[in-house]
Image (cartoon, helix red, strand yellow):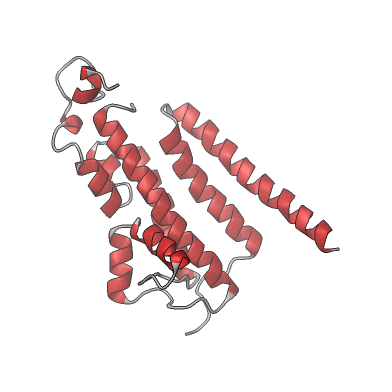
Amino acid sequence: MATEENKNGAAGSGPQSESQQGWVYLPLIAGWLVPGGGHFLLRKWGRGALLAAAILGMFVLGLAMQGKVYSGAHDILDLLGLIGDLGNGLPYLISRFLGIGADQVLVTTADYGTRFIVVAGLLNVIAAVDAHNLRTGRKS
Amino acid sequence: MGNPIFQPSHFAAVVLFALFVSTVFGITMRETPRRMIRYGIYCFVLFVASAIGLSWVMYLIAR
């Protein structure tokens, strides 16, 4: 059960810190759109930078391995891949807009790359939820 | 479409995967920096060790 302190943020019983102000879902959405963005909003610079490096690194290496970027769902596996890819937020949308990424898996490394891109999206969702938990005070 | 820019071996891909995932797990699953680092290293070792262990199992099954 959320206590009043948790509702007010992690700062404790004092006045809300600057990072705890604003719309409660903003870090969640910012974290989804930009990897590490939610943590940057909350002034968790180190954590945000590491998360951004890990998630963007994984996404970029996936593209460099000619990983497939899912654009539609023809069966259940495609649908799951698309959901994972969408977790990347803006990097996914930019890669779709610029036509970066393979349409089909043609080489072995492309298979690894496809998994890298999907897992980067899933990790980004975890990071965004973590930013939301920091914002609500569920985590310090 | 040409060859991929980056063509790691299967093991290199596993190590990179473990590194990135362990980093995110460490940061998001623990609260203090010290515990984050310890948990990240723990996840990394488990990922790599289980990949090597499963590889040996598959090798022995295939023989």
**Which residue reaches farthest right?**
B63
Q: Residue at x 47, y 85 (%)?
A: B1
Task: Report x, y in % for residue A108.
Answer: 59, 73
Is A125 rendered above or below residue A12? Answer: below
Numbered circles on residues, count: 0
Q: Which residue is drawn at 30% across and 57% down?
A: A89
Check the picture and name the quadrant holding the N terminus of chain A: top left
Check the picture and name the quadrant holding the C terminus of chain A: top left
A86 left or right of A77 in image: left
Where, by quadrant of the figure, is residue A17 drawn? Answer: top left
**Which residue reaches farthest bottom?**
B1
Task: Report x, y in % for residue A32.
Answer: 29, 51
Q: Which residue is drawn at 65% across and 59% down?
A: B11
Is A109 rendered above or below residue A36? Answer: below
A137 left or right of A47 in image: left
**Which residue reaches farthest front?**
A75
Task: Report x, y in % for residue A124.
Answer: 37, 50
Task: Report x, y in % for residue B2.
Answer: 50, 84
Depth order, front residue of B37/B63 = B63
Where, by quadrant of the figure, is residue A91 drawn? Answer: bottom left
